[in-house]
Image (tube, rainbow, N blue to C red):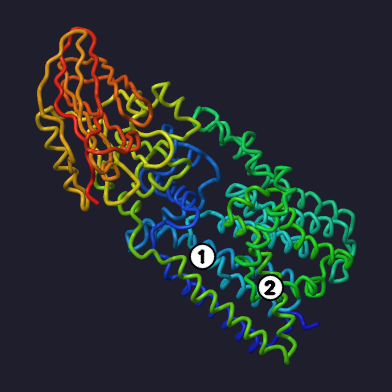
Amino acid sequence: MRAPSDASTLPDRLRSRFVIAFLVLLGVGLRAASLGLPIIGAHDFRQTQTALGVMEIREHGFEPLHPKLPLFGEPWEVPFEYPFFQLTAALVDVANPWADLDTSIRCTALLYFLLAAFFLFRLCGELFEAESTGTWVLAVFLLSPFNVYWSTAGITDYAAVAFTLAYLAFFAGFAKRGSNRELLAAIAFGCLATLTKIPSVAVVVLPMAVCAVGSLLAQTRLDGAQDSPAEVRQRAWKVGLVALVPPVVGYAYLAFGDVIKAESPYTDWLVADRLGDWYFSAPGQLLDPANHLLIARRIRDQLITQPLLIFALVGVAAWPRVVKPFGRRNFDSAFAASLLISPLLVILVFFNLYKVHDYYLVTVAPVAALVVGAGIDRVYAIRWLRGGVLLLLVLSAVNIGFVEPQKWALGDRPERLRFLETARSHVASHDAVIVVNENWSSFVPYHLRRRAFMLLDRNIEQALDSGFLAKAPFQWIVERAVRGKPLGEVEQHWDRSWEYLIAEGRSPYRLVRVDNGDDAITWRRSILERVASIEGAALEPLRNGAVELRTLTAGAHVSWSVDTPPEPSRFDGLLIDLAVTRPLRAAIRLSGTRAAASRTFEVRLHAGRPNRLFIPADRFEAGDASRRVRVDFDVGGSERVIFADVAFVAFER
């Protein structure tokens, strides 16, 4: 066995510090290519959810007891983790010279990753006999392809990992040396960890429990001094503080957040009690070998990588021999084993999370680095094997240098990102948006840089029938043209009129503004001007109904028939513009649509301004030029209605 690190000579320590500095600089350099990218990529729904919290702090300030996440309308609160990461990113964005929120978020993620690397290296000092083992562990953690990719993503996981590693490292130091400073540091970082992400802390529960038992039962310390019963009792209540205070703080905030979420019918399904099946293992999942193989392949291919798999096996085999003595000798093996077993137990407990989200492996990435680093150190100590070690490390570096950057390359900005960046200039900073047909995704509100309400499949009927959308301060609707409720159905329940619709290229999104105050004469022109002003988008009527003014009296009925275009795939929908002298309700029936032989829309018409109904193209059947869609209007009361236009429209592609 090598000599402990404190017996190393000054040149050895200087050389070690130089190697560590080189590794850190190399790790930062590998990530530099990703720092300027927008928040997009794998699991961008989760990345932009974090980023949306950063945006909220930058735009509206920070409320310590009521941090905002504007996804489900007022009061704009959906408390999950306490936003330490988001607050840090907002401060970085205030101080940075690049004036780009995406870059600030990625830089913050990298800072927390480096903080995690620092505390992992500190933990290595508590765990391993040889300092060289810690250096190899640090190299694996910094250069792992999995960590290279996720360490600049918009996720809070590395912040939670950094706090958790500090929690364990300071607790282990306190248990060995009894330092009150390390005691207070362990409590503080434990609270930060549980507030940031409780599932991340679970990975150190078993090692800390073994560490605590070992420290309490040790009657003879490593320096040979005897512990008196009073010293053991004093240590016991201190250990209790470290073990109990952080979980109590974390669960208290979790309960506080559940109270806030339960107050809204649109977030009450997100309270902890109703998410049990999401967080924890379901019996069917655990019994399916395919699920275990899926997670095992992710660990092998993403977290460890196949070139380094042999070192992981060596590290597991050599683990009990590389760990420092802790307390009484018979606790060495127990503490070492707990570090290996704990990640497996955590994955089994939170099985669904690890099955659905591959980025959850961030939580167990430090343990993987510990095992692989220990294995490399043991093999590299054998001189005649050093050439093979270096060859495998080169293969791993090739994997990092040539395969990983491909995940970052965007080429042309994706259509949906270009559309939202373009539309951002048309939506006032104080306007809020409704997101339709994109379940549980903060991609639209973040890249639009606006507060939002996600109209999910589970809450659409409630939101429409209760009048929530009409009462809330929403001025815009963003629709993704995929499965789900189309805009035509939302229109039935909306107490305002459409203003205009824009689309860009092949973008799957449509942006609609509601509640326009322009008069009927200038409104049509304003639509054309505003839509045409957006780069790459222009309103192009394929076939117009005759622009004819018609006056209807009480109980009147009129039928308007227009041809469908010969190429239905080239049109986006049917626009119906109406103007009325006084507010009233009217029934509009469409014949020849896909949804039904005759589909009726009950609409409320506003006086003194135009009213627009948009029927998406997916409601119409394909047909030739002779096929006709019939639009019938029924008007009640004693008011008059003027029909300004009925037209099929498409957007330039």
Q: Position of residue 369 (x, y in %)?
A: 66, 69
Drawn side of residue 507 relative to residue 527, left or right: right
Q: Circle 2: is it few (<14), some (14-19), or many (20+) Cα within 10 Å?
A: some
Q: Circle 1: is it few (<14), some (14-19), or many (20+) Cα within 10 Å?
A: many
Query: Relative to 560, does residue 439 appear above or below in the rendering?
Result: below
Give me the residue at 30% from left, 23% from top: 495
Question: What's under tag 2, amino acid-wise?
Answer: Leu
Question: What's under tag 1, amino acid-wise?
Answer: Tyr
Give me the residue at 62% from left, 83% from top: 16
Residue placed most toward the observer, 249 or 418: 418
User: Farthest residue toward the bottom?
Assistant: 384
Q: Position of residue 177 (x, y in %)?
A: 76, 65
The residues tagged by marks 1 and 2 sit, at their Cα atoms, a distance apart of 19 Å
Query: Relative to 308, does residue 253 appear above or below in the rendering?
Result: above
Q: Quadrant of residue 560?
A: top left
Q: Which mark is residue 309?
A: 2
Secondary structure, mark 1, is helix
Drawn side of residue 346 relative to residue 330, left or right: left
Drawn side of residue 212 relative to residue 653, left or right: right
Q: Position of residue 443 (x, y in %)?
A: 41, 48
Q: Which mark is residue 149?
A: 1
Give me the residue at 81% from left, 57% from top: 210
